[in-house]
Image: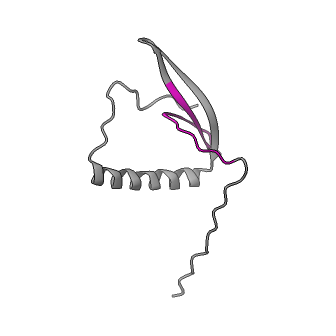
Amino acid sequence: MIIPTQPNFNLVNTAEYRESYANSVQVRVSVWDFFLVFGTMQQQAENQVEVRNFQGVYLSPQQAKALASILQQNVTNYESTFGEIKLDPHVQTAGPVH
């Protein structure tokens, strides 16, 4: 059995590349793709939260599944090093699909 060799990857950041912090990610799903909208969430008042979206990224279903897998691996590694990540029970983890 012939095992194919892995290609060499060269990662290059384009002029448009930016790094940002997001504490809000919304996911919209269609038949053809997943759309991730990144933003920052700030509580304006006791009953008022504002989310400022700053970037949307479309992913193919295959790339979305690969991302979910690598994120799960990294969360597992993080928790084995630093302990369980606890989620706020008041934060809704499931929402509508658009």
Residue visible at 50% across and 26% down in the picture: 41
Residue visible at 54% across and 87% down in the picture: 2
Residue 36 inside the magenta-drawn segment? yes
Return the residue nearer the eye: 2 or 54: 54
Q: Is residue 46 left or right of residue 22?
A: left
Residue 44 inside the magenta-drawn segment? no
Residue 65 visible in the displayed image: yes
Residue visible at 60% across and 29% down in the picture: 53
- Magenta region, residue range: 17-41
Measuring from the top left, give residue 98's x and y in whole percent.
59, 31
Q: Residue extending furthest right?
A: 15
Q: Is residue 84 above or below residue 62?
A: above
Measuring from the top left, give residue 74's x and y in whole percent.
40, 54
Q: Is residue 82 left or right of residue 5?
A: left
Measuring from the top left, give residue 21's x and y in whole percent.
53, 38
Measuring from the top left, give residue 65's x and y in whole percent.
51, 52
